[in-house]
Amino acid sequence: MIKIDNLTIRYDEIAALDQVSLELPPGKIYGLIGPNGAGKSTLIKACAGLIDIYEGSVFFEGKEIRRHRSWQKEHCSYAPEDVELLPYLKGQEFLQLIGRIRNSARLEEEIRQFNTMLGLAKKEDELIVDFSHGMRQKIAIAAALIGNPKYLLFDETLNGLDTRALNNLRQYMRKIAGRGKTILLSSHVLPLVRDWCDEVIVLEKGRVKNILPQKEVKQWKAEDFPF
């Protein structure tokens, strides 16, 4: 369970988030949508522990993450859209490094699984500096999945993935959500939000405007997308 309680984050005098409260029980994929500047990235970064100066609280399983940072780092993974990688490592070397940091008990098996799932197998011996944007996104996603984290936070990370990788990833994420994982992802891509997410959180001007069930979002057409 992720619980966000009256979360307020300001940049200078501007409130990026204004008294946001949410409860995200395990076993679901949650979508996060809103116009540019709505506070989506700020919310995800706060949950990832990358922002720790704020009013209110963020809890993972009852643990306030500013006081339980080590626990949060062990059980939660985060992948942004503009990911910072180590460009002069090979893709395989980068994933091995992440797996060792996360103490993965089945590292080589996980690397093979995610390389195949995301279409990275033929690129594993190439330097990251030579990767396209889409390939870098795939490496970031594979790194986030390694180590079997309970909580997965994706901030526009799925943009640029090819159809096969998206389909494979969707099936995998549905499977792990069914096993009790909690997944929060932000996206401006209507089919992804509509087809992947059990619930969709709508942010606007730093506040929660609405929380919609999948059955309602599934009826949307492009012209119905609110942003």
Image (cartoon, helix red, strand yellow):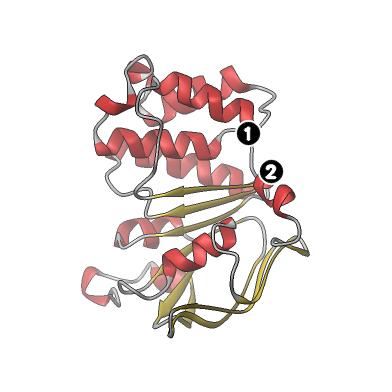
Residue bearing the label numbered 1: 147
For residue 177, side relative to residue 30 (left or right): right
Residue depicted at x 47% and y 41%: 171
Using residue 121 as the reference point, say whether residue 66 is left or right of it.
right
Q: What residue is shown at x 43% (from left), y 29% (from top)?
A: 117
Residue drawn at (45%, 19%) of the image: 92
- Asked whether 24 or 50 is in front, the reply is 50
Instruction: Give the quadrant of residue 49.
Output: bottom right
Residue on which disc 2 sits: 74
Disc on the earlier residue, 1 or 2: 2
Residue 162 against residue 43 in the figure, above or below:
above
- Quarter occupied by the N terminus: bottom right
User: Who's the residue at 42% across and 73% down the image?
Assistant: 39
Q: Secondary structure at mark 2?
A: helix
User: Of the numbered discs in the image, which one, if any, rests on residue 216?
Assistant: none
Q: Residues within 10 Å of mark 2 (few under 14, many from 20)?
A: some
Give the residue at the far left of this rendering. Answer: 223
Disc 1, SS:
loop
Q: Disc 1 marks which amino acid?
A: Gly
Foreground of the two, 55 or 227: 55
Kind of residue at disc 2: Glu
